[in-house]
Image: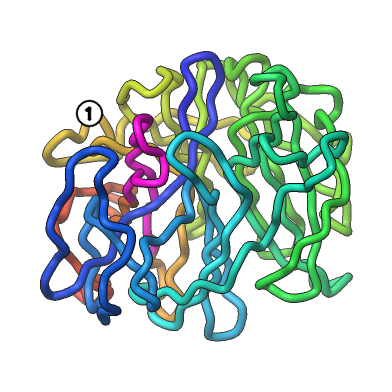
Amino acid sequence: MRNCFLAFLPLVILLAAPEAPAQSGPGEAPQEKPPTRYTSFRPGELWYDTDGNLINAHGGGILLVGNTYYWYGEKRAQHQEEGVNVYSSQDLYNWQYEGEALTPSSDPAHDLALGCLMERPKVIYNQRTGKYVMWFHLELKGQGYQAARAGVAVADKPTGPFRYVSSFRPNNHMSRDMGLYVDEDGAAYHIYSSRENYDLRLARLADDYLTPTTQDTLLFASHREAPAVFKKDGKYYLITSGCTGWALNEASLHVASSLFGPWQLLGDPMTGPQAKLTFGGQSTFVLPVAGQRGAFMFMADRWNPKDLKDSRYLWLPVQFKNNRPSISWLDQWNLSFFNQ
């Protein structure tokens, strides 16, 4: 989600069937169609779940549990948010709706009162506690973007329901667009836009993943948001978006040998039509593809501020050229791309 005052962003690409649904005008996207089995991704096109309903999971992220992927994202109405949805898939193409992972409260005094904003939800699993932990950007009902908090919820199962734990400003810093990253040693990190989105910060989480530690540092101050972190061959990569409200902008790629930096700017990783505008989308997550060594998918959202529910998903393969991540536009592709 983009806001010209602060930033938040979320994620993703669309899978498409052999015959893509007919395109509709703004605000006129069909809400149902007969179930179709997808065999490929078609970035930016309508994407339906296994019940024939449009997938509604914006600004989200994906967690792999066993052989099943779980996709968490914002449940969006035309102009408002209604909580966090969760979907499951065995193949990344076809997604089954599992319900609302986190639902707003009917209590008007609750932090999650209906009308609040829960943006960019990400879920990680804590092996020590056996809990699934969700973090999200929280804005309180009726306060615009003044709260700038991180919210935390937990569940016993990947499908939830998630139970709200608390919300706060990490180490007293504003927190808006955000992501989570779990390293190979099990340490988890919260990366977030702060100081009205002018700063990008990273904090190591406590062992239970429910709170930040004081190991919290400024990565850089360059007015960036929508962070997506991944790691390959001992190097950490970070894709971010500029802060331009709903207007499109150029993505940037940083690299570091440590999550706490220093981070080196490599430039724009996008190539192809509208590359300088991130193909009309905004980063939300980078997914390591199971069973494909060194394979990653870039996920972005193509926001539609006139009808946020009809914001489209952009999923594209991350390629490595001269040992540098590169993301090229493809009208259609499938996972066999990584076997080339």
Which x, y percent locates residue 211? Answer: 86, 45
Residue at x 53%, y 51% (from the top left corner): 75
Q: Quadrant of residue 90?
A: bottom left
Image height of 240 relative to 211, above or below: above
Highlighted range, magenta: 296-312
Which x, y percent locates residue 218? Answer: 68, 24
From the viewer's perspective, is 244 left or right of 262?
Answer: left
From the viewer's perspective, is 89 left or right of 39?
Answer: right
Q: Quadrant of residue 153?
A: bottom right
Q: For residue 8: magenta?
A: no
Residue at x 11%, y 71% (from the top left corner): 19
Residue at x 47%, y 34% (from the top left corner): 79
Between 62 and 303, which is closer to the camera in this rendering?
Answer: 303
The secondary structure type at the circle numbered 1 is helix
Between 181 and 37, which is closer to the camera in this rendering?
Answer: 37
Quarter placement of the C terminus: bottom left
Image height of 6 relative to 184, above or below: above
Q: Is residue 157 in view?
A: yes
Image height of 18 relative to 114, above or below: below
In the picture of the structure, the residue carrying the numbered disc 1 is 276
Q: Is residue 324 in view?
A: no
Q: How many residues crowd mark 1 within 10 Å: few (<14), some (14–19), many (20+)?
A: some
Between 60 and 25, which is closer to the camera in this rendering?
Answer: 25
